Image (cartoon, rainbow, N blue to C red):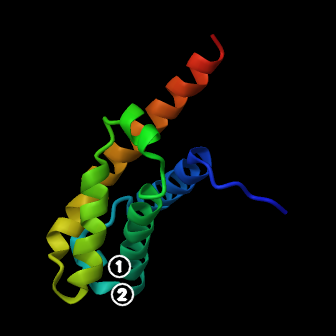
Amino acid sequence: MDNPKTDSYYIKKIHNDLTFICLHMNEVKIEELESNEILLDSMMFRLIQISETSRKLTDEYKKRNDIIPWNALYGLRNRIVHDYGSVDLTIIYETLIHDIPDVLALIQDHELNNINSSKL
């Protein structure tokens, strides 16, 4: 079974990870995230995956979609991986609650625009 790794493939993976975060962080308070090791690890893993998958997108794709904060996504991965034990949980929480839904909306909006423009 051949599975070509295209921008479309990678953006779907990113979309799935963003959606997973939004679904599982809905109405979660910072205290719950801090006390639930499985939830915290799961969210950190998804953030890392989003960052690593984002790096696999072509430069052309990222330039066409420069409204998405690619550099911020890359930087977050580095902070998590290299400073895992001392990552500021408040920053992670704020990212999960506020920034991730915003990035998901940008990607969904952009993908909808791509679908509509391809029908013209």
Instruction: Determine whether the residue tagged by mark 2 lies in a helix, strand or loop.
Output: helix
Q: In the picture shown, does residue 108 fall above or below 36?
A: above
In-image side of 62 versus 116 (left or right): left
In-image side of 20 versus 115 (left or right): left
As measured in the structure, the alpha-carbon distance from the residue carrying label 1 to the one carrying label 2 is: 5 Å
Q: Nearer the viewer, residue 106 or 72?
A: 72
Q: In the picture shown, does residue 41 fall above or below 19?
A: below
The quadrant in which residue 34 appears is: bottom left
* Residue at the outermost front position: 59
Instruction: Name the residue located 40 percent from the left edge and 41 percent from the top edge.
Output: 62
Q: Decide: few, some or many residues near mark 1? Use Cα within 10 Å; few <14, some 14-19, many ≥20.
A: some
Give x and y (percent) for residue 54.
43, 56
Give x and y (percent) for residue 112.
53, 28
Q: Which of 36 and 115 is in front in this view?
A: 115
Q: Disc 1 designates what residue?
A: 40
The C terminus - image quarter:
top right
Instruction: Name the residue located 18 percent from the left edge and 79 percent from the top edge.
Output: 87
Are dots 1 and 2 in contact, CB under 8 Å?
Answer: yes
Instruction: Name the residue located 38 percent from the left edge and 70 percent from the top edge.
Output: 48
The N terminus - image quarter:
bottom right
Q: Disc 2 designates what residue?
A: 37
Q: Nearer the viewer, residue 104 or 9?
A: 9
Q: In the picture shown, does residue 20 fall above or below 103?
A: below
Residue type at tag 2: Glu
Q: Is residue 97 visible?
A: no
Residue type at tag 1: Leu
Instruction: Name the residue located 35 percent from the left edge and 48 percent from the top edge.
Output: 101
